[in-house]
Image (cartoon, helix red, strand yellow):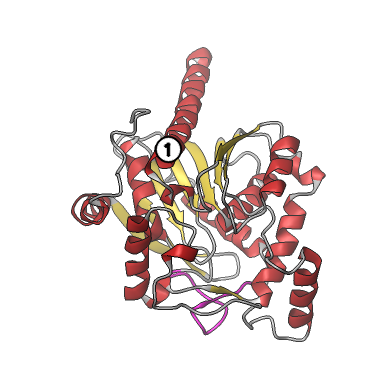
Amino acid sequence: MNAAGSLYFADEGYLTWQKNLVEPYLKQCQKYAYFHSYDGAAIFYQQYLAAGADTCIVISHGFSEFAEKYNEVIYYFLRQGCSVYILEHRGHGYSEREVSDDQKVYIRDFEDYIKDLDCFMKKMNYRMERHRILFAHSMGGAVAARYIEEHPKVFERAILSSPMFRMQTGKYPWWVAKMTADFYVRTKRGEHYAAGQTGFDSRPDFEHSSCISRERYDYIFEKRLKNSRYQTNGSTYGWLLAAMRATETLMRKKNLERIKIPVLIFIAGNDHMVDNRAIAVFENRVETASLVCMPASKHEIFNADYQTRCRYYQEIFDFIMKNQKETSYEKSTIN
């Protein structure tokens, strides 16, 4: 793939490309199954194997997302020669949920996401390619950051796209939002929707979405309309409190100092979901981190405008290629 982005899909004809090229291609190399996490929870995952690959990408998706949302991203990784593994976080997609309402995002303890990922890596260890890179978006970025703090030697590199190191809380100050969430959890109402949060709305709302590409928004929204497992939508007070506590933990200086692998971070200039100031602090405190700003993008950079997406993917593949060159050099010096 070149810097001009000639092999990246434009907006025009996107739905046709997905239906006629991407989805059939992915189906050929896809396997899916469940694994049981540390507490017995059934977690759904997909794997896509690239022939002859020695590098794999493990994807940690964002809030209310699901594996199929990453079809285009997975396709590009495969075409780059990397195998891909993606698990659907508990409470999302086809993974087990802790509440009866599939449209609510709820978790008792954010560390469960990290434990699930660790169980997955241990289960798949003997099957995975030797070189492993972690790719994460938004909430998945918080999961990824906590994971590489607690397990600094599992992955060789990490790519964090608009990571949730601190969420925006709208018109409510951070401390008010946290205090309110704590009150609801303490009074056994943690499964209630947080203020301003609702279930899935079958009416599209592109203008208030995190996408700039209308075609990509429509493609994802169509999948959500057709599958109730993809209609997970609103935060509960339980999730909100767990996420706030987790981001406070991951941003502690002693935890950030444990990150030793190269970390490539993307920041969106028009992000209305995460606090970019926290990302800047992370990049400043983690010596191996580098920051790339996409000024024209909203939160979902992989669903931004064409020029932004081209630069985004080129930065990612340059980062992966650098890892492949470094590991090849190390191998040659050992031999």
Q: Nearer the viewer, residue 329 or 88?
A: 88
Q: Quadrant for the N terminus, please.
A: top left
Residue 2: % across, % down: 34, 28
The answer to whether residue 48 of the structure is visible from this angle is no
Main secondary structure along the magenta-highlighted residues:
loop
Taking the spot 63% from the left edge, 64% from the top edge, the residue there is: 112
Q: Is residue 292 magenta?
A: no
Taking the spot 51% from the left edge, 73% from the top edge, the residue there is: 233
Q: Amino acid at mark 1?
A: Tyr
Determine whether 264 is above or below 239 in the image.
above
Residue 31: % across, % down: 32, 56
Q: Nearer the viewer, residue 222 or 328?
A: 222
Q: Nearer the viewer, residue 130 or 222?
A: 222
Residue 320: % across, % down: 47, 32
**In the rendered image, which quarter is residue 183 located in?**
bottom right
Tell me the magenta residue range: 93-107
Residue 167: % across, % down: 67, 59
